[in-house]
Image (cartoon, helix red, strand yellow):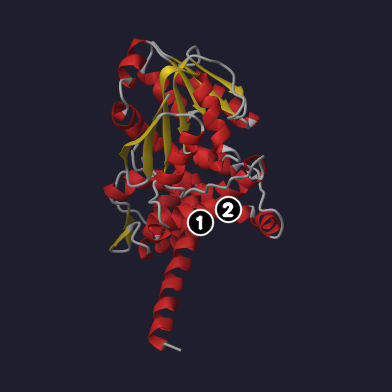
Amino acid sequence: MNEAKLQDFMGKLVVDMGGAALMANVILGEELGLYRAMADGAPVTPEELAERTGCNARLLREWLSAQAASGYVELEGGRFRLPPEQALALAVEDSPVYIAGGASVLSSMFMDKDKLVAAMRSDGALSWADHHPCLFSGTERFFRPGYRANLVSNWLTALDGVVARLEEGAKVADIGCGHGASTIVMAQAFPKSTFHGFDFHEPSIEQARRRAADAGVGDRASFAKASAKEFPGRDFDLVCFFDCLHDMGDPVGAARQAHAALKPGGTVLLVEPFANDALEDNLNPVGRLFYAASTCICTPNSLSQEVGLGLGAQAGEKRLRHVFLEAGFSQFRRATETPFNLVLEARK
């Protein structure tokens, strides 16, 4: 037994357990509006924060102390301050780095524990639709800041000739659209184009319709329940898969359907979690997050569907390329990337 190695691991375990417990406190802070109440950067006492939010001052003292111990807020002479850098991630929902709203994805992993235990002990299957509803809203809020920050300005511009077609008036399909965050971002940016969102989860489709109406793009962004292998329509200029292909039981079938639905020369925009091709190259903080989420959400959903290929959230470019070449696409390339995303282009 290497005592030093044991002590190092125990220290790491305590840090990770503290992080998990702190995420529960982040979810509380977001839902109760605590971060937003501190977004002005002014130091507050627990009692002052209680007056702003209507929450219990004694519990707020514990919450603020946990935040300070984690470096999320700063302690200044008995008062607590949310610095502007942290506010961008925790309080400013329009910020490109806002993450607090998406933390409820983690809630679903714990709330669905019994279902995941049953899946692990059987065929591995747990459908997206059978998760706690907090997963659906959390997923939208997790991905939406990145779509707002990158989709129009960086990802679409990295594709060959696509922005020009969108500006002139293109027909676009958004497969696995969820609550429609990506569809709406594109519809707002390209008023001459029409957008069609498809998802197999009816409650998400209903929410997407409400989101589009609220955003003023309901006349150009429509939504319908359909699977990735059976979505209707032909002659699309662009078919998009945002952070969803790896969740599908038959991604090759979904890619074949996209190929059939595209015009000659049409494009697929595939956005997937960033991953290298080798496991050894993904043993890092980003890989840890995505593998953990894939264990609880992505791969069980794939195993719940026909074929059940189980790509997982860390599939990597090589495996994704194979999917699209098998589906009949003649061109496939990495268009761009972020620390969290692979942005890939397939051409018919």
Left or right: where 90 falls relative to 294? left
Do the residues bearing badges 2 and 1 touch, measured as CB atoms within 8 Å?
Answer: yes
- State the SS at label 2: helix
- State the SS at label 1: helix
Q: Is residue 233 above or below residue 243?
A: above
Residue 56: in sight, yes or no?
no
Question: Residue 100's x, y, as percent?
Answer: 43, 47
Question: Residue 264's x, y, as percent?
Answer: 43, 16
Query: What number is the disc on residue 292?
Result: 1
Residue 125: in sight, yes or no?
yes
Crowding near pointer 1: few (<14 within 10 Å), some, many (20+)? some
Pick whichever, 76 or 69, lies toward us.
Answer: 69
Pick whichever, 51 or 334, lies toward us.
Answer: 334
Kind of residue indicated by mark 2: Cys
Question: Residue 136's x, y, as percent?
Answer: 56, 39
Crowding near pointer 2: few (<14 within 10 Å), some, many (20+)? many
> Looking at the image, which residue is at 29% across and 30% down?
158
Q: Is residue 59 above or below residue 320?
A: below
The Cα atoms of the two marked residues, 2 and 1, are separated by 7 Å
Left or right: where 30 falls relative to 160? right
Question: Residue 243's x, y, as percent?
Answer: 47, 39
Query: What number is the disc on residue 62?
Result: none
> In terms of image quadrants, where is residue 210?
top right
> Looking at the image, which residue is at 38% across and 13% down?
191
Kind of residue indicated by mark 1: Ala
> In terms of image quadrants, where is residue 289?
bottom left
Q: What residue does disc 2 label?
A: 296
Pick whichever, 85 or 37, lies toward us.
Answer: 85
> Looking at the image, which residue is at 45% across and 21% down?
215
Q: Is residue 60 above or below residue 339?
A: below
Quadrant that contains the C terminus: top left
